[in-house]
Image (spheres, helix red, strand yellow):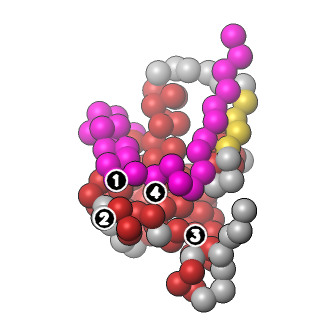
Amino acid sequence: MINALLFPGQGSQSVGMGKRLYEELKRARDLLELANDILGYDLKKIMFEGPKEVLADTRYAQSAIFVCSAMYLELVKAKGIRYSYAAGHSLGEYNALLAAEVFRFEDGLKLVEKRGVAMSRENGKGIMAA
């Protein structure tokens, strides 16, 4: 059997995302705590408590989705599930690259954070049209 991983893009975020996995898998907890350190703000609180409007902000949504997907990638690894392919929709491409070991989690998160800020309306310049 050939297994493939498919990672979601922006719009898949929801308040409470990753909370159960955070509670059950140490490596997932470690990733989210590391993300908080790298980002310099409490992403865990935004992911678990919202509010929805803050989580929907591109600056936070993209990092939250990347980290949550990375947490689920750790679950796949913990279960010993082997995969041959990884793909992602838009932002999910970064998680596919992470799954393919193109870069480390820390580097991917820094890229995604910059992407989110660049696409944010708040910076006065960036926005994505699809």
Amino acid, disc 4: Ala
Q: Which residue is mark 1?
A: 15
Given the image, on which type of amino acid does mark 1 rest?
Val
Q: Earlier in the sequence, mark 4 or mark 1?
A: 1
Tell me what residue is drawn at x 63 percent, y 32 percent. 5
Separation (CA) of disc 3 from disc 4: 10 Å
Examine the structure image and report whether residue 51 is included in the region drawn in magenta: no
Disc 4: CA contacts within 10 A as few (<14), some (14-19) or many (>=20): many
Q: Which mark is residue 64?
A: 4
Determine contact: label 2, label 1, CB under 8 Å: yes
Query: From the viewer's perspective, is 73 left or right of 97?
Result: left
Label for residue 5? none
Q: Which residue is mark 3?
A: 116
Q: Which residue is mark 2?
A: 51
- Residue 56's x, y, as percent? 45, 64
Tell me the quarter of the image containing the C terminus: bottom right
Q: Residue at x 41, y 57 (%)?
A: 34
Amino acid type, mark 3: Gly
Q: Does any portion of residue 30 appear in the rendered image?
A: no
Q: Which residues are magenta?
A: 1-27
Cα distance in 3D space between marks 1 and 3: 18 Å
Say which of marks 4 and 2 sits in front. Answer: 2
**Vertical relation: 63 (above or below) 28:** below
Tag 3: Cα neighbours inside 10 Å, few (<14), some, or many (≥20)?
many
Q: Give me the C-alpha separation between circle 3 and circle 2.
A: 18 Å
Residue 7 colored in magenta in the image = yes
Is disc 3 in contact with disc 4, using a CB cutoff of under 8 Å?
no
Q: Left of 4 or right of it: where is 17? A: left
